[in-house]
Every structure is written in C-alpha cells, then in structure tokens.
Image: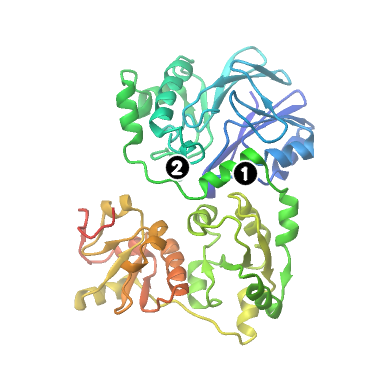
Amino acid sequence: MKVEQIYTGCIAHAAYYLESNGEAAIFDPLREVQPYIERAFKDNAKIKYVFETHFHADFVSGHLDLAKKTGAQIVYGPTAKPGFDAIVAEDNQIFKVGNYVVKVIHTPGHTMESTTYLLIDENGKEHGIITGDTLFIGDVGRPDLAQHVIADLTEEKLAAHLYDSLRNKIMPLSDDLIVYPNHGAGSACGKMMSKETTDTLGNQKKFNYALRANMSKEEFIKSLLTGLTAPPGYFPKNVLMNIKGYESLDTIMDRGKKPLNVNEFEVVATETQALVLDTRNAEDFAKGYIPNSINIALDGSFAMWVGEMITDIKQEIMLITYEGKEEEAIIRLSRVGYDNAIGYLKGGFDAWKNSGKEIETINRVTAEEFARKYSTEKLVIIDVRKKSEFDSQHVVDALNIPLNQINNHLAEFPKDKPFILNCAGGYRSMIAASLLKQRGFDNFTDVIGGFTEIEKTDVPKTSYVCPTTLL
C-alpha cells in the first residue's frame, strides 16, 4: 500500500500521503502545502481529500490552503463543527482513494471529534491506522486540551472517553496493522512518546502502558492524568484557528518577506512596537545583538518556543535571520499561528553592526571556567530546564526555574548579585538570557554547552529534588 509518512522533526509532526490509481489524500497537513502538491504531481495524481484527525492544538493545519489550491474536500470525523466547508463524516463511513478505502473510526478522547482512519488496500486487506493524537507510539493523547476551549470537557471526562475508544475501537483491530500517529517524541501532545514514529498495533498492545489489557477505567484515568504538565499557552489559540479558519500562507509570506534597511528597520520597529526576534544561533547572538531583541534560534525547537514565550499570538514580529533564512522563519512562525511577521533586516545583524548602531552582548563562560568559579565562590545558579530534567540531575544548590515559567517568576532572579544560567545545551538558556536582558537584568553569565558540558566536570551534582525547586 502506498502510504508515506512526511515527518517534520522540529515540531515532531507527521503528515501522511496516500496514493492509488491517480488519486491522493493528505492526512493532517502542515501550514505550508506546496510539498504535498509537488508530491502528488510527481505521481501524476490529483489530491482528492484532506483528512483531519481532529482540530489540532500544537500547529495550524494546512487544510484550507490545500483544499483551495487543489479542489480537495476536507474531511473531519463525527461531531466536528468547522467554520468552513467540509465533510463531517459518520462513524464507519467509507471514502475511496483510487483503489484504496479509508474507513472512519470515531475515537473521542483526546478531543471529542478525534477520529482514526483505517487504511484498506486494493485487495481488501486492512493495512494500518492513522491515529492522530488518539494513539502514539508508547503513549496516548493528552485529554486536557479541549477544556481550554470548552470548559465542560474536563480532562476526566475526556480520559474516560479515550479509555472506551481504545478498548472498543482500537484494541480489537488486527495486531499486524501499522500505527501511524500524528506526533513523535518531543511533542507536547503526550508525555512519554517514543522516538519511533511507527509500529505495529500488536507491539503497542504489549508495550504501551495505556493499552494494558487488564487496566480498569479508573486506573487508566489516574495513569493518564498523573504527571501532565500545563499545555503551552498557544494551544487553545491554534485550536480556534483550525476551527474558524485563517489567512492564506501566501498572504502571510507577502507581508513578512519585506527587506528593510537598517534605518527603515529601526523606524518600523519604533512605530509599530513590534517584537524584534533574532533567529541566529546562541553563540552568534551572545557575541552581539540588537538591544531589546529576543533570541529563539531556528536551529532548535523554534516554533514550540515561540509559542511558549511570545504570549500574544497576534504580536507583530520583525526578524533577524541569517541570509536566506527569512522564508523559513516566516513559515515556521506560521505553523503555530504567528502570522504577523512584518519584515526582516536586510543584510542581517552584520548590517546593523556595520552601521555603527548600538549593540549588546551576553556574558558566557565554559563549563571548565564555571567549575573553577564554583570551587572558590558561593554562586547563585539558575537552571532553566524542565523540572523532570532538573530532578534527574542538577548542580548542587541550583535553583530550577523552567524557561516557560520565567515570565511568572522574575522576582526569583536576583538583581543585587550575579548569577549563572544553564539549560541542557545552551539553546534555552540563551532564550532566557535575551528575555532577562530585555527586562533589565545585566548581572548574569550563561554556561556554554549547558549541563551537558557541566556533567563532564567535577562540579558536585545531585539527583534529589532541591528544596528551592519551583513546583
């Protein structure tokens, strides 16, 4: 059966391409749809359907642009109420894609409209299931997102629905079916997803904690809800965009791809109060950057951290990028609904620096230099990794303030004495450094390479939870 996973690692997202006899279908597409159109063109196929497993929270889907550009019909599962033309399928409804069959299996739980699509080949053999966020490899979808849009849909109610969906709809299916989930490790839509992005259903029945055959509903709900962290703040906003609709990516690109010289950039930034977002890597940013700009580098989980740290999804944004990376930055912003890029600095940071404009820098030390200071001074150390990472191992006496909580805990950062920042590898601590600089902190130093490099030194470490750790 011709089904291809199209995986985008920076947001741990999987779309799927299905083709048979000149007809194609796309499942859960990303915002930029041209790659799907080109893939179908390669097969001389027409995209007939855009299947959505649910209204996504962690990204803005490309269903509207894809339907507009190809004439494909958008399909959702039962109970969906999209604000645009779409087929709202019935449970067990059949769709034909060439000689293949796509069968709708309503599997509420992650959301109420969540749907699994059973793929059946030209010989009538069941091949696999596209599960969306209902079933991941090693995990299942979190049930606490819908209540941020519809208050009555509590996480307990949705977890109970998910238990029933898994037991009554998914687990009775054949063990040899291939499971094609919407996400892999790194996504915030689950808590313990595997780095593998496909598996057989039989293996998942053996090794996925949520599919244990003798698990009661009460056990399932408790297990599923234990350890869930708060979802990123942009999730409900993405859900609403996916339900109601949005501007075409073409329009967003036209607005964002405006080259501005240094003087124009400065004037526009001042007049619009736009956020200046520097997407260069941490090392280059630390050596010099435009005052008050924020660093979220393209070479990491860019879209996720934009969504976590820029609270206003409608915020106008002006970009600093490496040459040729402007379009990539705008696209990756749009994946999570940040559609208001209004231009970029022509010539990048070098143009700003060469013009003689004011710049700022971030103080940094190597792990070895940090170790020497630690042995002779009483240091204030702030670790911005996730609590689970911190609890696993951290420098003795360090304070844990996870990056996504910084804005709510600025009072925890000392202004009257110096402190040291670290994360795992330097990506997150540089985001933190740029935010702290913007808020008037100037008495800190970042550790190059973060805890990964600190681990190699003789600085004392502990895996116990530090009493000063923020819960």
> How many residues crowd around disc 1 within 10 Å: few (fewer than 14), some, or many (20 or more)?
many
Q: Mark 2 points at which residue?
A: 185
Q: Measured from the top left, where is residue 365 in percent x and y? A: 36, 75
Residue occupying the far bottom of the picture: 356
Where is residue 152? Give x, y as percent. 46, 33
Residue 261 image-quadrant placement = bottom right
Q: In this picture, is 65 found above or below 25?
A: below
Q: How many neighbours does mark 2 have within 10 angstroms: few (below 14), some (14-19), or many (20 or more)? A: many
Q: Badge 1 is on which residue?
A: 241
Q: Residue at x 28, y 57 (%)?
A: 470
Q: Which amino acid, mark 1? A: Met
434 sits to left or right of 43:
left
Query: Of circles 1 and 2, which is in front?
Result: 1
Image spot of residue 221 (x, y percent)? 34, 29
- Marks 2 and 1: in contact by CB < 8 Å? no
* Residue 292 located left or right of residue 422: right
Between disc 1 and disc 2, whose residue precedes? 2
Work out whether residue 9 can be spotted: no
Question: Where is residue 136 shown, x and y percent of the image?
Answer: 46, 32
Q: Residue at x 21, y 78 (%)?
A: 377
Quarter containing the N terminus: top right
The vertical placement of 353 against 79, above or below, is below
**Looking at the picture, which amino acid does disc 2 mark?**
Ala
Numbered label tally: 2
Viewer-closest of 217 and 198 = 217
Helix, strand, or loop for circle 2? Answer: loop
